[in-house]
Image (cartoon, rainbow, N blue to C red):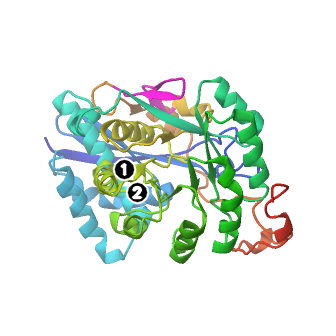
Amino acid sequence: MKITDVRTHLMQAGAPPHTGWTGTGKSALSNSRNWLFVTVHTDEGLVGTGEGSGWPRIVAEAVNDLRYLLVGENPADIERISQKIRVAMMGHGQTGVVGSGAIAAIDIALWDLKAQRLGTSVVDLLGGQTRKTVPYYVHASNADTAREAIARGIRAVKVGGIPGIVDRAHEIRDAIGPDVDLMVDLHGPPWLSGADAVAIGRALEPLHLLFLEEPVSPENLDGWRLVRDKVDLPLAGGERLGTLHEMRTLIDEYLVDVLQPDTGRFGGLTQMKKLAGIAEARGLMIAPHSGSLGPVAEFAAVHLLASIPNALMLERLEPDWSGRADAIQGQLEVSEGKVLVPQRVGLGVQINEAFVAAHPSTRNNAIAGGGWNEGTADESVYMQVRRGRARLLGTRE
């Protein structure tokens, strides 16, 4: 079997009704969410489907530019093709999540193709099922949305943002009780200083979080070290990183307890499976990031999490934009906060090309609102020390 074509399918996706950030201000997903699907075609008529993120509009151009390297290749040689793409990109420098997003889209499609040709599911190729269902968590912007999730049988919720986060997290814990897991994401904008992250983290300790996510920016390693030393909570991070090498410091220094590779921008299932093995050796868990991703990458994440022993849970936007279901053929089955692992051939999903084409990309950049010190939003700084520190911890200090 030979690859005959590689095609990109870029679309503008609608916003979810709410995210963990909504309680703080306006989410960047409200008007700039793009999904990039990639199909790999073969001379035997089989078509593999993948998805790439890490700035989808730019990743689409990267995949189009890589097409000539792939036509004529045997799609079964997944590792070699991944290595070949990395070598081809080398002259452009370290391309980060854009390069890794292109690799991810192609890699996922190749796994789908291989499983189709062998008449089995992707999870079987990844080593078979460790579990038949994968637990997931959803976003809650306040106590009411958390209660709604629990009423649907979901057993874990995450709240995000910075202003008022301590009060909101306590209110949600009061609403859901001690038997439901709670997570907090401090993902900016703007990023906290290490001292501010420590103050907030300590104020959240009584809530016994499943994890505190991205307390400081991913490159602020001294900040990560400070939070790890001073805060008695499990830490999670890694969604903005694209390679195994970029994850090394977080892993080698035990700066996190939970790794969150983004399924669409971490090099695909090939690299995520490697990361899971490294994490297992260090006693770390895997909980893939999925906040802005489309449905194909979600299928891929479910196959991965079903196959590895150190899977924590899947991030899921539920409810999401109503068009999410229309963008694909084949749906994940969910019940009581768990996803049933697909047993269909391949990934078990294809895109609805007509629907995708009817929603062309219009923009793929935005700045979330509501996170800065009062009166400074127009500065749009990347990191900001919090003023009004007497109010930093709300009424819970």
- Which residue was labeled with disc 1? 105
* Residue 48 % position (x, y): 29, 39
Residue 298 placement: quadrant = top left
Residue type highlighted by circle 1? Ala
Front in this rendered view, residue 4 or 234:
234
Q: Could you tell me if residue 382 is visible in this image? A: no
Please say if the residues under marks 2 and 1 sit with CB atoms less than 8 Å apart: yes
238 over 112 or under it: above or below: below
Return the x and y of residue 318 as percentages of the image width and height: 60, 34
Going by the image, does 53 lie left or right of 142?
A: left
Q: How many marks?
A: 2
Magenta stretch?
327-342
The verdict on residue 82 being magenta is: no
Q: Is residue 333 magenta?
A: yes
What is the distance, in whole Å, between disc 2 and disc 1 at their CAs?
Answer: 6 Å
Q: Quadrant of the C terminus?
A: bottom right
Q: Quadrant of the N terminus?
A: top left
Residue 279 is tagged as: none
For the point 55% across and 45% down, which residue is it?
Answer: 360
| Residue sitting nearer the eye, 278 or 71 | 278
Q: Which amino acid, by three-letter code, is at mark 2?
A: Gly
Nearer the observer, 162 or 86: 162
Can you identify the residue that label 2 sits on? 101
